[in-house]
Amino acid sequence: MSRAATAKDRVDSALSRLESMVDERLRIEREHSEALAARLAKVEAEHEELKRVAVEVEARLERAMEYIRSLLAADQS
């Protein structure tokens, strides 16, 4: 085998290894990205639930404060 053919084979082999490494890295990064997207979706759902609960608690506190105010106003009458 000539030196040029040997060099070409070595370059081809190196390129194949490099492509394999890139493909593997892309697969790992894609899995990581999908896992992060799933976590983000879960956190966003939890955030929406917490916002709903906070609005409900706020409304209940407002009603309780109004009730207390009405009791105090009636007591002063």
Image (tube, rainbow, N blue to C red):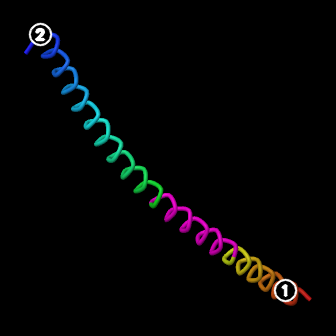
Q: Is residue 67 above or below residue 38?
A: below
Quadrant occupied by the N terminus: top left
Disc 2 marks which amino acid? Answer: Arg
Counting other residues with Cα less than 10 Å from the Cα at mark 1, is it few (<14), some (14-19), or many (20 or more)? Answer: few
**24 is higher (above) or lower (below) than 43:** above
**Percent coordinates x, y for residue 47 in the rendering:** 57, 65
Q: Is residue 11 left or right of residue 23?
A: left
Which quadrant holds residue 45?
A: bottom right
> Is residue 8 covered in magenta?
no
User: What residue sits 31% from the left and 36% below the top?
Assistant: 22
Q: Which residue is mark 2?
A: 3
Residue that sits furthest to the right in the current view: 77
Considering the numbered disc 1 on the image, is that residue within a helix, a strand or a loop? helix
Q: Which residues are magenta?
A: 39-55
Residue under the point 10% across and 11% down: 2
The label on residue 70 is: 1
Residue farthest to the left, as pictured: 1
Whole-Å distance between the Cαs marked 1 and 2?
Answer: 99 Å
Crowding at label 2, few (<14), some or many (≥20) Cα neighbours within 10 Å?
Answer: few
Q: Residue 36's x, y, as percent?
A: 43, 54
Picture coordinates of residue 42, whole percent (x, y)? 49, 65
Residue sitting at x 87%, y 84%: 73
Amino acid beneath label 1: Ser
Q: Give the quarter of the figure containing the C terminus.
A: bottom right
Q: Nearer the viewer, residue 71 or 76?
A: 71
Dot 2 lies on which element? Answer: helix
Say whether marks 1 and 2 touch (CB < 8 Å). no
